[in-house]
Amino acid sequence: MRFKFSIFALLLQVAIIILFGIFVEYKTGSQSEILHPPRFAPFVVTVYTDSFLLSVFQDVHVMIFVGFGFLMTFLKKYGFSSVGINMLIAAFGLQWGTLMQGFWHMADGKIRVDINSMINADFSTATALISFGAVLGKTSPVQMLILTILEITIFACNEHLVTEIFQATDVGASMTIHAFGAYFGLAVSLVLYRPGLKNKHENEESTYHSDLFAMIGTLFLWIFWPSFNSAIAHDNRPKAIINTYCSLAASTVVTFALSSLVDQRGKFSMVLVQNATLAGGVAVGTCADLLNHPFAAMCIGAIAGIISVLGFHFLTPVLASKLNIHDTCGVHNLHGLPGVLGGIAGIVVTAIQRTNGALHTPGMQAAALGSTIGIALAGGALTGAILKLPFLGQASDKNCFDDSIYWEVPEEEKLHVVHSNNYDEQSRFEATM
Amino acid sequence: MRFKFSIFALLLQVAIIILFGIFVEYKTGSQSEILHPPRFAPFVVTVYTDSFLLSVFQDVHVMIFVGFGFLMTFLKKYGFSSVGINMLIAAFGLQWGTLMQGFWHMADGKIRVDINSMINADFSTATALISFGAVLGKTSPVQMLILTILEITIFACNEHLVTEIFQATDVGASMTIHAFGAYFGLAVSLVLYRPGLKNKHENEESTYHSDLFAMIGTLFLWIFWPSFNSAIAHDNRPKAIINTYCSLAASTVVTFALSSLVDQRGKFSMVLVQNATLAGGVAVGTCADLLNHPFAAMCIGAIAGIISVLGFHFLTPVLASKLNIHDTCGVHNLHGLPGVLGGIAGIVVTAIQRTNGALHTPGMQAAALGSTIGIALAGGALTGAILKLPFLGQASDKNCFDDSIYWEVPEEEKLHVVHSNNYDEQSRFEATM
Amino acid sequence: MRFKFSIFALLLQVAIIILFGIFVEYKTGSQSEILHPPRFAPFVVTVYTDSFLLSVFQDVHVMIFVGFGFLMTFLKKYGFSSVGINMLIAAFGLQWGTLMQGFWHMADGKIRVDINSMINADFSTATALISFGAVLGKTSPVQMLILTILEITIFACNEHLVTEIFQATDVGASMTIHAFGAYFGLAVSLVLYRPGLKNKHENEESTYHSDLFAMIGTLFLWIFWPSFNSAIAHDNRPKAIINTYCSLAASTVVTFALSSLVDQRGKFSMVLVQNATLAGGVAVGTCADLLNHPFAAMCIGAIAGIISVLGFHFLTPVLASKLNIHDTCGVHNLHGLPGVLGGIAGIVVTAIQRTNGALHTPGMQAAALGSTIGIALAGGALTGAILKLPFLGQASDKNCFDDSIYWEVPEEEKLHVVHSNNYDEQSRFEATM
């Protein structure tokens, strides 16, 4: 992969720099940042926007790079790739996302960037990172760069369709990011299906410390989800924050309860704690700023926890064995099902609140959910077909879920021998020779 | 524990959702967020509050979930429980705390929640997490849920007593959270005393990497403590931030100095660096917004570092051997003694500043400190007695400090064997057979 | 070291408390926080400043304590010292930095502190932490305290020279912090050169998990760098944020590409991913708020990634073998070369923009860069000579890169034996005896 990856990545970066040179400018002037002209004087709002947005941007940035990156480090021999390739995808993707989202909102032939567009670019990378979870351990870095290009491009089109054409609401992106990323990734995984991995690969398991590293990712995602869901909620920011907080708390308690319930010995499972606890954040996304009662957010979170746990326990094995869809991180249970639940909650809430104003209608919400899943599946299948092109190269089944094929890995064997010099058994050992 | 825990946790979550449905509403309208009516126009202050409070809330959230969670991962075989059950307690506790604190401040029979009440709910969970540290490794998840319910309920009553009845100041909660949580936990630990653990349990020790995981917790607590201590300091926010910063810096340098001094070979101890460095944040809490000189904050921090190190070195072993109080994480030295120091500092500072205004008096501060410790000890003893009820079940002494009783734990033995195939000694090994 | 370190550290802390008592006061009154008097009413700006600055301060605080601390944990046996001594240096250094920077800006014989001065104090510690990276594993805690005192003192003088005398711009401190810290550290390393370490020390390597711990540091530095580079950028804050974001993204993609390209088997290197990905943040620092096109920031980031990777791959081995400069963390490639690149970019940008206003001139920028490197090298050489004084003591070559000389380290040998009781091979093992 020496030249293939390097030259491809360098060419992409050069192309992006040229495109930025041609199209991208700073958004200037305070008028661009006025959010509430009727209620506030402009200068006050500028202040608000700058300070609030930087804080929210940094929170979202932590979720993308630390949250997603460490969440995937649970595999015993795939930590470098999880956190490293996650960083590569995100750093490349946010540049590509700036362009793809920007092309839909150009003025005078220019894309104007500000902190708001940085938040949106970070959001766009989340789709590729979710799909990365579905194919984790089974793809090469070159394949992931191609997937990132295609998925973010298609995401930006679907996002435009959902928000501009359907005028649907999806403030925390349950549909446009979570469900989209999950179903896109599942379609890719289906097309790239490897019969040789049908039986559990020996590397596809965690160690004690890899599970703790993964909890770093889980917790930073969990903690900053209120910022994520409120980032683009203009008028109802505090409501979106409170609802996300309530939903996550409920899904966490429910996840622990069901994790114990579905296990024969009643033990908790780290896979469930790492993932299903977050389902509440996904599912409350679409209507985080619309709900009128905190307990409604808790109900959504509790249901999300239930379906996520049941999905991991019952559905994932079936998908793999019957439908040939191998989902390494279980993104279907964390992002797919809860994302669909979020979309349905959005339909219900807009139906209930139809009377007042009716900017968003249940019909359009349903169209948004349907189009998102359809475009994700079709886009993922297309992307999978492209990734299968033979000249791209792929690791053999045997080398899956193993960093050492793409990374220089410390020779811990040596380390072990050095350490062993102090071990009692070592001396006893040498005595046997 | 399969059904006992699951059904109890589900029932609690359902009950909470119902209570939220009946009592909890969003706090709406900008007037609720006006903090400084005399000085600022309302709309400006709304801006300030929203943006500032979200930032502070997210910082406190990191402390509760990452800070407390990882701080307790130092035990070699108890990392899943430390970070996992910490998450469960916090996610459940913040819902319960919203209700318990809210019942003292209802209007028209409703609890109105906003970002401010979320910060306070997070705060209330800290008491249960501190007590968790005292009994870490010796209790079951069911016991911890019961402890959380009881402790947060009693905490909310004591907080009301301290702030409303005594009109005492405790902006960073040295007394109401830190001392309360510590003495509550110590009383529970005393009642649950297990003679079988008198001699050090073989699992009650750290490994090299578990100590590094614990430093993640330490550092995020240390870093965000200025936000914690200033979260509810209205007029003197910058002062509370600066004083906390100064106090923590001083306690850190003093901790390193004393850690080396009390060790016979002059070596640093990770236990002390993980814990005593934080004592300055605890101790400066009560008067963080009242001190008039940064060097006073430094003195408080330095003294806190000294008593915390001496507590770990001399007092904890005595408590365990003479008083049958086994304190797994040494919360008495991090939260108990420095919390009392903070309470005393509050008495001294209010005595010195008695002339100007006299909203807070040294007598009332002393009453607040005394009531807090008394209520914590009584509440903890009562809670311990309830947790001892036989049908709750408890791990045997042998299974203490071991995740595998409550968690599915990766089978690293297998991993080890797989790895060993590459080791030099393995080949030599096989040669001997 | 028992008494030497303890008494020295305690004396320093006492001295600092006394100096704070004499010189340091809170900055009070809103007028101190007015940043934009012509455009905004004072009270608005106070709001802006407080809320924005606390958020930025906490971000920078994470970089200093978690970012720098964990970045250096990559060595297999030096994690306690990396994250622990990093914390000691930073906690001591921020107090010393408050004084040293404050002495240059006294009013009425007093140093007035606010959140702004806390950010600057945190910045000042970064120089000592960068130099710590150059000598990591080879110095004692006493030596590091002395280095911190001297380096921060000299840094404050150079900073005054650069910003006040030369009136040079260096908003993200490419020159005054990064290049300064790197060349200071390299000079110390040269003077402290140990021929016994010429051949690679057996402890000077990573393990799989130590490399993952280091990624925690990398990512938190990467994520919060926009806050770092914009912290003191008054009028052009959003621009500084956007440019840092773009530069880091470009340097990350380029680092992955070149990491694969320079490796014979095309594999990625964790050393490069941990470090060179950050070079874009360093290099864009000087002119982050001056650039007029995002693509210019990307070009700077891409070039920084290239020189950083090439530095690690080709230059570091030469420095060690030919010039006797052993640079443990490769700070020359992360902070030195990209810092100089940042200085040169500042010269070019001010030359191009010379016409408008001309507050900063290319000549003065060049003088700032030259003086910074010269003062850093001279100061580092002097500091190295002082650290060599025999009574300070130093670890023997054999004990370098090993925590156990300064820290109580868990006896994992014992742990290993306990664990082994469960291993298959252990039983087979015992069968052989």
Image (tube, coloured by chain):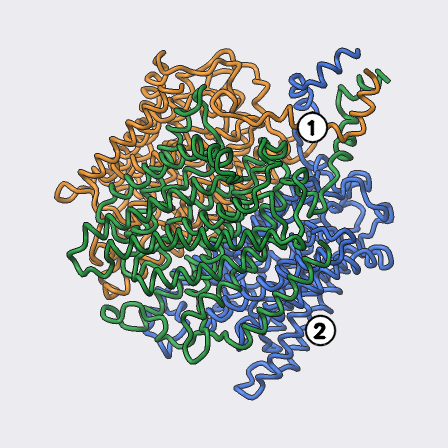
Chain colours: A blue, B green, C orange
Q: Residue furthest bottom?
A: A355
Residue B72 x/y as whole percent? 54, 42
Residue B85 x/y as whole percent? 60, 51
From the viewer's perspective, is residue A43 above or below residue C142?
below
Which residue corresponds to mark 1?
C418
Residue A309 x/y as whole percent? 71, 60
From the viewer's perspective, is residue A152 above or below residue B207?
below
Amino acid type, label 1: Val
Residue at 69% x, 36% y is A2
Q: Secondary structure at mark 2?
A: helix
Seen from the viewer's position, the closer of residues A375 and C45 is C45
**Quick one: label 1, few (<14), some, or many (20+) residues within 10 Å?**
few
Q: Secondary structure at mark 1?
A: helix
Measure the alpha-carbon separation of dots 2 and 1. 56 Å
Seen from the viewer's position, the closer of residues A330 and C170 is A330
Seen from the viewer's position, the closer of residues B426 and A186 is B426
**Quick one: label 2, few (<14), some, or many (20+) residues within 10 Å?**
some
From the viewer's perspective, is residue A332 above or below residue B217?
below
Amino acid type, label 2: Gly
Residue C242 x/y as whole percent? 45, 54
Which residue corresponds to mark 2?
A370
Q: Is residue C336 visible?
A: no
Q: Which chain letter matches label 1?
A: C
Q: Horizontal placement of B231 versus A163: left or right?
A: left
Residue at 56% x, 18% y is C201
Name which quarter of the figure residue A225 lies in.
bottom right
From the viewer's perspective, is residue A54 above or below residue B276?
below
Quadrant of the image containing the C terminus of chain B: top right
